[in-house]
Amino acid sequence: MHEESVQPELERDQNQPVSEKLEEVNVPESKVNIKSKPTPIIKDSDKSKTAKVTKVNVHKKHVAKKTKIRFL
C-alpha cells in the first residue's frame, strides 16, 4: 500500500516540470521566428551572434530563450 502512495507523487512531479518546459519552449519559438527575418539586415558581427542562437535553438530551445534576452 505504501508503494501505491509513492508512485502517484512521482508521476505528479514528472508532469509538473514537463508542463513548465513546454510553456517556456513555446515563448522563445515565437521570438526566434521574428529574429530570423531581420538576420540579413544585421551587420556581419551581429550575424555571428544570431547564427549561434540558431544553433543553440536546434539543441536546446530554452537556452536560446536566455540568449534572446541578452539581445533585447
Image (cartoon, rainbow, N blue to C red):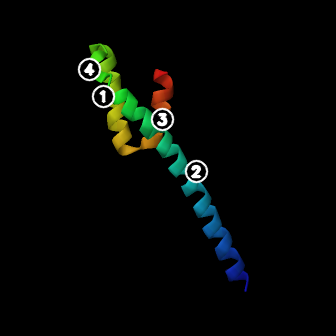
Residue plotted at (54% across, 56% down) = 18
The quadrant holding residue 35 is top left
**Distance between the alpha carbons at the discs numbered 3 and 2:** 14 Å
Residue marked by disc 4: 40
Q: Secondary structure at mark 4?
A: helix
Disc 3 and disc 1: Cα gap in Å?
Answer: 14 Å
> Considering only vertical position in the picture, is 14 above or below 3?
above
Mark earlier in primary sequence (3, 1): 1
Residue at the disc numbered 3: 65
Q: Closer to the camera, 23 or 67?
A: 23
Asked if residue 28 lies left or right of residue 42, the reply is right
Does residue 51 lie above or below 3 as drawn? above
In this picture, is 38 found above or below 31? above
- Mark 4: few, some, or many residues within 10 Å (few <14, many ≥20)? few
Disc 3 crowd rating (10 Å Cα; few below 14, some 14-19, many 20+) is many
Disc ID at residue 20 = 2
